[in-house]
Image (cartoon, rainbow, N blue to C red):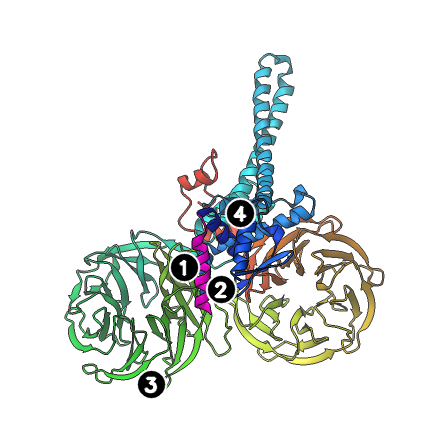
């Protein structure tokens, strides 16, 4: 069936002219819902979303429907067979070309609908970051907008142009005023004062416009040049601390941060860390090997460029003592470099014997044996006990095609090799001069590009052109079995590496991403995704301490990523609630997998899981620590609230279960004095309970106002206000200073979808809201009747279900449908200090001039 679908689609596409082919591409992209680590799915759309003014639209729709590729009814259009998404190569190619651009387009379409539903209200137009991203995407050659989408975008651009024109008009007015002053000397003092005020107004308006524009550009750059994006965002904030600029600054580290290493002039094919972790080697098709000093991974320094290879270099390996580096490549040689001092590497020893490209090298754990793999279908073993005088040990044959990867197990007794014959072969090295075949592992349907053993030797990972990574149980070398198949990459997987602890496995792919799986027994199925490099990612390596990951790409760069991100991953489904303990050292998270987890976050950039609470029979989407931190309340969609003693975070104890609820409980919150408990659920109401005696709560009051279910509640630090968020896309504030006579204060409405979470900072008047629109919004509630929006934060790839502030108020935890928990620095000056401590290299004059035209060069970090 798949083949027939693809043939029908391709034949019909080929029959169309160029204009209608472009329309077909636009249509199928609109009809597809992009997956995040999962398969893409079909997406029904209303006919009004399509360009009805284009006379070709009905013709294309009817012909596609006649071919049974799409289904039409009076109001909607959808793909007939979801299998078409994977069966038609051309459609797969379209979906892989610019997935981030497709997401920008999808958000633009939704915003257009909102604008039209509000009668073209100017307040619904794109501004700041959203407008800059949409404009950047629309200016690409492949962007296809309908008339209604173009009208929406043009209206936003016109509004921005009007703001800029206002600044220029003020400037012209000032010049006319100065000219008039020469004839009006008697009014000089008055005129000068007026001129200064007008000049200040014009300058402020210009600076606001430049700040907003730069903030949008920084957000768009974050994925491809994190260091530059962080500095542009900080400079925009320093220029004028607008809402957009503050949001961009605070979002600088929302996704894993990477430092870019540049210098190679062609594709980079391999990376390797020295055993000490302070030196990184990179190999390139430009025939060089480069050595980098990573003692400070955010301030990399070039150490040396090793030359001598007469062809591209695609393989690297450090000896266990770090004194020797092996490199190999297309010139059919292996070269051994003495790195007694990286800045003065001696001339290499050259190993010859392979009759084709040398694709991989690996040292044995004791450093006495080197393995090399070649296109000549052989693996060669070398005695390198004395690297200055290497000797051949054995020539291993058995593969039916080129061998592209080799790896020793941690004991040095087994060698794994992989190749284009789609197999992994294990060799017994009890007698290194006569290796014996131990096993042949099959299952991959494409070239096996890479193999790697786990640090304990009990697992072997193999990566293939078939887009999968397979895990093999090698605890018993005589009975190797397949344990698990890891999916997620959308193109061939070129490299794999285990983290030093063996819990995480990284895969690099030609789909331009690195994906990281938790391969522990309790690990989540969905991988974390690191993206941003502009070319295929072909090699990946963990630093020995596990705090950094290097990836090499066809875009001529190496990226060194900060790990773990900071991302907390343990839940097997959506994370919908989080809460900090009062002492800030612990974090609780709850999820749709019916569990709650306790985390050690004493170091927020190195969190670790402590214990799991699994008593609920439904999703746990409400969490709250009581004052003092000894008791945790968990609210479940099983109509219960459970109380736990968490004095010992490793061994929490159940205290009581509250069951007096008519329906599910979405949220729970303690008042600062611990005497009141607020609960909320789908019945649109917030209930206040007297929990002075936790085993016998008494109802106090019922708060109304929401027009749909209530998702979250939280008390203000002084206990006088209560905030709630709901499925009606609003957050609401009530005065609860007198609980029995509570009254509404204000309603917050800027979110464009369900508001799932709300949280107060422990001190001051900062309120955070978050929801299905993937954004976090920060509010100043000094006057709770008139809250002021401070910033919008972006970084999650799906809706955000939960929020929690740390007790010191400057760290915000967010959790969402993308199954991650993210930690944010929300103090602007702390975020600025972090940018300056990490971002490298510094912004250049040329880059400054591009993003801040006609403004003096003032880099934000000195």
Q: Secondary structure at mark 3?
A: helix
Q: Which mark is residue 702?
A: none
Q: CA distance from mark 4 to mark 1?
A: 35 Å
In the image, residue 553 sits, relative to residue 55, either above or below, namely below
- Asked if marks 3 and 4 touch (Cβ < 8 Å), the reply is no
Query: Residue 375, image x and y in percent?
Result: 23, 68
Q: Which residue is at a point 68% across and 43% down the rendered structure image?
A: 121
Q: Which residue is mark 1?
A: 512
In the image, residue 258 sits, relative to residue 600, either above or below, namely above
Q: Secondary structure at mark 4?
A: helix
Query: Residue 821, image x and y in percent?
Result: 56, 65
Relative to 524, 411 lies left or right:
left
What's drawn in magenta, residue-wise? 1-17
Relative to 690, 305 lies left or right:
left
**Residue 488 in sight in this render:** no
Q: Which mark is residue 477?
A: 3
Q: Is residue 776 magenta?
A: no
Mark sitting earlier along the chain (4/1): 4
Q: CA distance from mark 2 to mark 1?
A: 24 Å
Q: CA distance from mark 2 to mark 4?
A: 23 Å
Q: Which residue is at a point 26% across and 83% down the rendered structure image?
A: 437
Q: Which mark is residue 56?
A: 4
Q: Which residue is mark 2?
A: 84
Mark sitting earlier along the chain (2/3): 2
């Amino acid at each position: 069936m798949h083949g027939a679908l693809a043939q029908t689609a391709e034949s019909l596409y080929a029959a169309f002219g160029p204009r209608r082919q472009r329309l077909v591409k636009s249509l199928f992209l609109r009809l597809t819902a992009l997956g995040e680590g999962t398969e893409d799915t079909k997406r029904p759309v209303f006919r009004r979303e399509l360009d009805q003014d284009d006379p070709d639209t009905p013709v294309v729709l009817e012909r596609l429907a006649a071919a049974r590729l799409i289904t039409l009814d009076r109001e909607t259009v959808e793909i007939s067979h979801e299998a078409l998404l994977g069966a038609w190569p051309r459609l797969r190619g379209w979906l892989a070309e610019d997935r981030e651009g497709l997401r920008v387009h999808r958000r633009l379409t939704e915003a257009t609908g909102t604008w039209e539903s509000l009668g073209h209200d100017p307040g619904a137009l794109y501004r700041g970051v959203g407008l800059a991203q949409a404009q950047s995407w629309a200016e690409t050659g492949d962007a296809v907008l309908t008339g209604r989408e173009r009208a929406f975008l043009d209206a936003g651009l016109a509004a921005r142009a009007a703001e800029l024109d206002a600044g220029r008009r003020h400037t012209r007015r000032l010049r006319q005023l100065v000219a008039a002053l020469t004839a009006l000397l008697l009014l000089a003092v008055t005129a000068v004062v007026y001129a200064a005020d007008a000049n200040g107004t014009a300058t402020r308006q210009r600076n606001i416009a430049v700040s907003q524009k730069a903030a949008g550009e920084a957000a768009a750059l974050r994925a491809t040049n994190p260091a530059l994006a962080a500095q542009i965002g900080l400079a925009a904030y320093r220029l004028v601390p607008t809402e957009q600029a503050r949001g961009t600054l605070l979002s600088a580290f929302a996704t894993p941060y990477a430092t870019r290493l540049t210098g190679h002039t062609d594709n980079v094919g391999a990376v390797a860390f020295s055993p000490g972790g302070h030196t990184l080697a990179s190999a390139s098709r430009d025939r060089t090997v480069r050595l980098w000093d990573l003692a400070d991974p955010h301030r990399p320094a070039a150490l040396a460029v090793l030359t001598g290879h007469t062809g591209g270099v695609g393989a690297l390996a450090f000896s266990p003592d770090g004194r020797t580096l092996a490199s190999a490549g297309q010139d059919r040689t292996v070269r051994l470099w003495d790195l007694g001092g990286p800045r003065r590497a001696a001339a290499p020893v050259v190993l010859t014997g392979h009759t084709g490209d040398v694709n991989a090298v690996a040292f044995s754990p004791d450093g006495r044996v080197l393995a090399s793999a070649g296109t000549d279908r052989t693996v060669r073993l070398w005695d390198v006990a004395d690297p200055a005088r290497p000797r051949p040990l054995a020539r291993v044959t058995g593969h039916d095609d080129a061998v592209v990867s080799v790896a020793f197990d941690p004991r040095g007794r087994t060698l794994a090799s992989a190749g284009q014959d789609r197999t992994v072969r294990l060799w017994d090295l009890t007698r290194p001069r006569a290796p014996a075949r131990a096993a042949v592992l099959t299952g991959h349907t494409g070239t096996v590009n890479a193999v790697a053993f786990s640090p304990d030797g009990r697992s072997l990972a193999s990566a293939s052109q078939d887009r999968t990574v397979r895990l093999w149980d090698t605890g018993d070398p005589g009975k190797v079995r397949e344990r698990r198949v890891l999916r997620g990459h959308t193109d061939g997987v070129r490299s794999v590496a285990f983290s030093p602890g063996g819990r995480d496995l990284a895969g690099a792919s030609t789909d331009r991403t690195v994906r990281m799986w938790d391969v522990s027994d309790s690990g989540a199925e969905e991988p974390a995704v690191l993206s941003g490099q502009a070319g295929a990612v072909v090699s990946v390596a963990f630093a020995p301490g596990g705090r950094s990951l290097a990836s090499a790409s066809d875009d001529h760069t190496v990226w060194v990523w900060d790990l773990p991100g900071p991302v907390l991953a343990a839940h097997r489904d959506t994370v919908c609630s989080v809460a900090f303990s009062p002492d800030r050292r612990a974090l609780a998270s709850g999820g749709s997998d019916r569990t709650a987890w306790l985390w050690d976050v004493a170091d927020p950039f190195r969190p670790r899981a402590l214990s799991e609470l699994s008593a609920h029979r439904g999703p746990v989407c409400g969490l709250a620590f009581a004052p003092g931190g000894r008791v945790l309340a968990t609210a479940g969609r099983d109509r219960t609230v459970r109380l736990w003693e968490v004095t010992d975070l490793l061994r929490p104890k159940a205290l009581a279960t509250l069951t007096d609820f008519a329906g599910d409980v979405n949220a729970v919150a303690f008042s600062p004095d611990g005497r009141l408990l607020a609960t909320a659920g789908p019945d649109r109401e917030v209930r206040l309970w007297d929990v002075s005696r936790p085993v016998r709560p008494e109802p106090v009051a019922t708060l109304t106002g929401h027009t749909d279910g209530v998702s979250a509640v939280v008390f203000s630090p002084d206990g006088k206000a209560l905030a709630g968020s709901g499925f009606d896309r609003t957050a609401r504030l009530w005065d609860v200073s007198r609980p029995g006579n509570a009254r509404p204060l204000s309603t917050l409405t800027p979110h464009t979808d369900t508001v799932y979470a709300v949280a107060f900072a422990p001190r001051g008047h900062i309120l955070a809201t978050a929801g299905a629109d993937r954004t976090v919004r920060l509010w100043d509630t000094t006057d709770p009747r008139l809250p002021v929006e401070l910033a919008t934060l972006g970084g999650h790839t799906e809706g955000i279900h939960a929020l929690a502030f740390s007790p010191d108020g400057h760290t915000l935890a967010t959790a969402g449908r993308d199954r991650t928990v993210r930690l944010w620095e929300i103090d602007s000056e702390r975020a600025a200090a972090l940018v300056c401590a990490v971002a490298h290299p510094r912004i250049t004059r040329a880059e400054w001039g591009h993003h801040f035209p006609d403004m003096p060069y003032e880099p934000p970090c000195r």
